[in-house]
Amino acid sequence: MNHALNSAFPVALPVETHFIPLFFRLRFLWGDLAKQDNRKHLLEDIFSFTKIWIRHSEPERDLKTVERFSLLRCQHREDEIAEKAQDFWTLVAGLFQQYANLSNKLIAGDKSAFYRHLDLEMICYGIDNVRVIHMIRDGRDVCLSWRKIWSGPVSVASAARLWREHIFKKRAWGRKNPDRYLEVRYEDYIQTPELWLERIELFLSIPRQSIANGDELAGFTDMLSTSSTHARIGQKIDPANKDKWADQMPYADLLLFEAIAGDALQQCGYATVSRTTALKRALLLALGVIYRFCEPLVARYWKRLVKGALPFFLWLRSSLRRAFTR
């Protein structure tokens, strides 16, 4: 979807940013953000976070190329962004709009794949005119993909629980905000992409664009496709690129996933294949609870904790540096 929006619309989407909820929770550390100096210090730490995040989340890609298509592209404009902002949210909005301007696009967007549901009320409270495109994919295929990523869910039970939470909470928000929410099923999109791009055009209320900035788009596409998880980007859409779980997911994992998230699968129109008795379902759910409590013992859980605490350590480092250089 990132590539489709970048290529078909005057929308600029940088590589995944991930900083918004992490820094929002700890924004008080930077003091009164009505003060320009504090906003500048916060922005500097956001750029530092972005450098670290890119280095660890994009190991297969050339770092300099990724930075070109990240928010680091705006780093030389940090004084201007901080000056025009008034608080946390106007700083975020200004940063993304600056990225859009430098990319010769009309508006900016963000595609950050969080494993835990991101509170959409938080985003929409702080930034006006937000539109949410919710791309839903069969949770069993999502599970297979997530578990290949270094910071992804550590178990099938965890992946099922998190995917289910995404579905129910985002759909609930969409029912309350129907004019700001568009749901796109991945399996439907790859069958009729042109139809869905027309629906997205109506939803965003902005016209499709001809590819005027071909070199920019080609560079973005080439950068994304260098990762094994995005190797198909830029290629012709394959309508058969779905239902990988049928061949790749062990039956025991399938039973567990469907025991936990079967209701969400069925609500989204995905057929479940396992037939479990009430007793077997109860045992599988109990196993899922055990997995959840064992997660802190698994290395990747600690990686997520480090990521969540990174804004604090960046603030601490910057504060100490300023204190000793006065």
Image: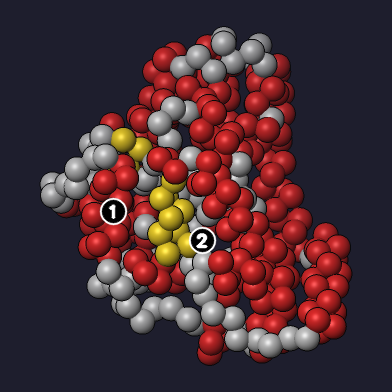
Q: Sort mark 1 into few (<14), some (14-19) or many (20+) by Cα contacts within 10 Å.
A: some
In the image, is residue 127 above or below residue 180?
above
What residue type is disc 2 on?
Pro
Residue 307 is situated, as x and y percent measured from the top left of the image, at 67, 47
Look at 26% across and 34% down and name the residue there.
106
Q: Which mark is residue 245?
A: none
**In the rendered image, is residue 248 in sight?**
yes
Return the x and y of residue 65 as percentages of the image width and height: 36, 52
Tell me, yes or no, if residue 287 can be seen here: no
- The residue that disc 1 covers is 199
Q: Residue at x 86, y 63 (%)?
A: 293
Q: Nearer the viewer, residue 262 or 213?
A: 262
Closest to the camera, between mark 1 and mark 2, is 1
- In the figure, residue 248 lies in which quadrant? bottom right
Dot 2, how many residues are within 10 Å of its Cα: few (below 14), some (14-19), or many (20+)? few
Of residue 91 and residue 267, the one placed in the foreground of this image is 267
Examine the image and state in which quarter residue 32 appears. Answer: top right
Which residue, given by chain and number where applicable, does mark 2 sit on? 59
Residue 272 relative to residue 200: left or right: right
Element carrying mark 1: helix
Under mark 1, the amino acid is Arg
The number of discs equals: 2
Label 1 – label 2 distance at C-alpha: 35 Å
